[in-house]
Image: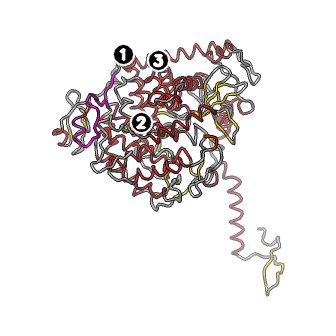
Amino acid sequence: ALAGVLPVYSKRGGSWALRRVFRSREKVLILCVGLTFLLICIGPIFYLPDLRGGLSNKVDNVYKVYKEMQKAGPELILPPPPLPDSVEAAADHHHGLLHNHDGLHHNLLDTQQQDHHRLEDKQRLLDKINNDAELRVLEKPKIVQISSTEANKGEVQAEENNIKIEVPKGAAEAAAVVQPPAAAAASGGAAAPADSVVVVQGGEDPDPTARQRREKVKEMVLHAWRGYKSYAWGKNELRPVSKRGHTAGIFGRQDMGATIVDALDTLYIMGLTEEFNEGRNWVHNNLDFNQLRSEMSVFETNIRFVGGLLSIYALTGDPVFRDRALHIGRKLLPAFDTPTGIPYALTNVANGISKNYAWASGGSSILSEFGTLHLEFVYLSDVSGDPIFREKVMRIRDVVRKMDVPGGLYPNYLNPKTGKWGQRHTSLGALGDSFYEYLIKAYVQSGSKDEVAREMYETAIKAITDKLVMKSHSGLTYIAESKHDRLEHKMDHLACFTAGMYGMGAHVLNSEIVENHMEIAEGIANTCHESYVRTPTGLGPESFRFSEGIEARALKSSEKYYILRPEVVEGWFYMWRYTKNPKYREWAWNMVLALEKHCRVEGGYTGIQNVYMDNPQKDDVQQSFLFAETFKYLYLIFSDDTLLSLDQWVFNTEAHPLPVVGHNSMYRKAKDAEGQW
Ligand code: DMJ
């Protein structure tokens, strides 16, 4: 209709002339433009979710957004008010601290009512647990001890309750509850003291409450495992709320069953035979790094996959696990081809191309990553007979040992090409943590023979104790971080593992350096507990700070999440073993209750986004370390000390137990392994 009216330019004989009539092609074009315009104007009514469903739905959606903002609460504008927590109130009152650091007052009546509700909730939960126990939901499967002839047949039948224990051919020890040292030594294990009995299942505590609580932990494991199995089997992790798989960058882009590998030893020690067999079969049939095409984190692959597989190999003697660990260990080797031998953080498993994270101080490798390979690589050489892995970590250690350490504090970054330190940031939390952990644990793993590890640990821990261990106003012990010689009074949840590390040092070393280390260990375990009880959820934040107005509390919103991390209960576990103070078991039990209340969902367990909210949002990730670490430490704290005795086993940083040389008949050294310390 517009064709006769509107002027159109047409090119004729090289010059533009005005024309008043449209050609048919132009008419079609104009029609298309018109239709597209109409579609853009009217389309949203039909297609945009927010507008679908008419006005009432629109109001609903606006209301939903409003509710979400309400949940985020005053934090959008103001920092959160001080906790309505009676413990903090009492502590702060007692020490005369400025309670309301942000000027807000909380209502005492509200506090009492909330406390009352919490007690009621706790009681309801306890009733449910007791009821579960009565219904025998938590019944423990019977584990049978089998002879090597039976085991070689491939499978055996449990005596009483028909639980099948599949045993791979040739793995005679696989289902043994207790293995006599003589038998294991005959099958290639390192010599162990004649009177030592290695307990890797069972280990029931004489105390009935502890036994009941342990059964509860086992029920939690089953719930998490069933969720993973139903909705994410073979994926790296589970999203328990949306009930689907999840893959974090640390695992590369592909599905490698990280949860299965991380969970195996926990399932095994709990005697969850059916679930263990499901996992074992998956590893046997599917775990194949030849299929991988993406970059993997050398550190994460080592602590979860290599460490997990080696641990279950030690526990069962099933060669499938050793062979897979070796297969994966070899895939990591290209990362070590650097001028210094300090490995890169990432390696592409398909083509060996390796690199560091772009964000890490001028292309540096990270202390906690290259410093957390030692236990697994040494053991991998010993069980496989291939010395290459031991050589790689010994070289790392030589380089690090010969370097000047500014002020005795190891920086978190080291450039693998130049061999120079990067940014001067020292931390016992993220980026530094398990480097220190592996120094003392390498000494323990060697049966107290590795003098280099001992010396390095003693020197490093002395500097940390002198320069970074602090006391808050009210006397809470914490470890600060150092940034360019300035202290940052912040402690990560990750750094709470140091309670166990200080305790272990005090326990196994004979040096004046560690004289007050048990006291420091107890102090840190207590501070980390404070970071939990100063929240309404009873779970602690990712990081917490100490200043004039704040103690053991997160400051920024980015520090308030809890992602099912283990380090706090890990510290309590060691403290329980070393001191037998019952408060550690009580704290662990309160953590169980908090996990049940805030993290348990129908599909499994989820992290939460803000521990300072009564009803926090869920992050919808069931981390694989929930099985490997958090559940394992909870289970062990309610077990007898003979189960995975600390004299016979050393836990890698992912809580996978590895045997101690000369003290554990399950060491299973290959006949041709050198085993030099
Ligand atoms: C685990 O993978 C290991 O404990 C690691 O050393 C640190 N972070 C997680 C758990 O928080």
Instruction: Pick the quarter of the image with the N terminus.
Output: bottom right
Q: Is residue 538 visible?
A: no
Locate residue 55: give its quadrant. Answer: top right
Residue in front for this viewpoint, 25 or 168? 168
Work out whether 333 lies above or below 3: above
Q: Which residue is mark 1?
A: 208
Residue type at the position of mark 1: Pro
Q: Secondary structure at mark 2?
A: helix
Q: Which residue is mark 2?
A: 444
State yes or no: residue 195 in magenta: yes
Task: Kindly check if marks 3 and 1 are in contact, taking CB atoms under 8 A apart as contact.
Answer: no
Q: Earlier in the sequence, mark 3 or mark 2?
A: 2
Which one is in front in this view, the residue at disc 1 or the one at disc 2?
2
Q: Earlier in the sequence, mark 3 or mark 1?
A: 1
Residue type at the position of mark 3: Asn
Crowding around mark 3 (Cα neighbors within 10 Å: few <14, some 14 to 19, many 20+) is few
Work out whether 584 lies above or below 248: above
Work out whether 231 lies above or below 536: below
Which one is in front in this view, the residue at disc 3 or the one at disc 2?
2
How far across and how far down the image is residue 602, in percent? 46, 32
Magenta segment: 182-204
Residue in front for this viewpoint, 579 or 561? 579
Residue in front for this viewpoint, 441 or 363? 441
CA distance separating discs 3 and 2: 24 Å
Crowding around mark 2 (Cα neighbors within 10 Å: few <14, some 14 to 19, many 20+) is many
Q: Which residue is mark 3?
A: 581
**Horizontal placement of 567 versus 66: left or right?**
left
How far across and how far down the image is residue 96, in percent? 71, 15
Q: Is residue 350 visible?
A: yes
Instruction: Pick the quarter of the image with the C terminus.
Output: top left
Locate residue 304: give its quadrant. Answer: top left
Q: What residue is at 20 percent from the left and 43 percent from the top?
A: 154
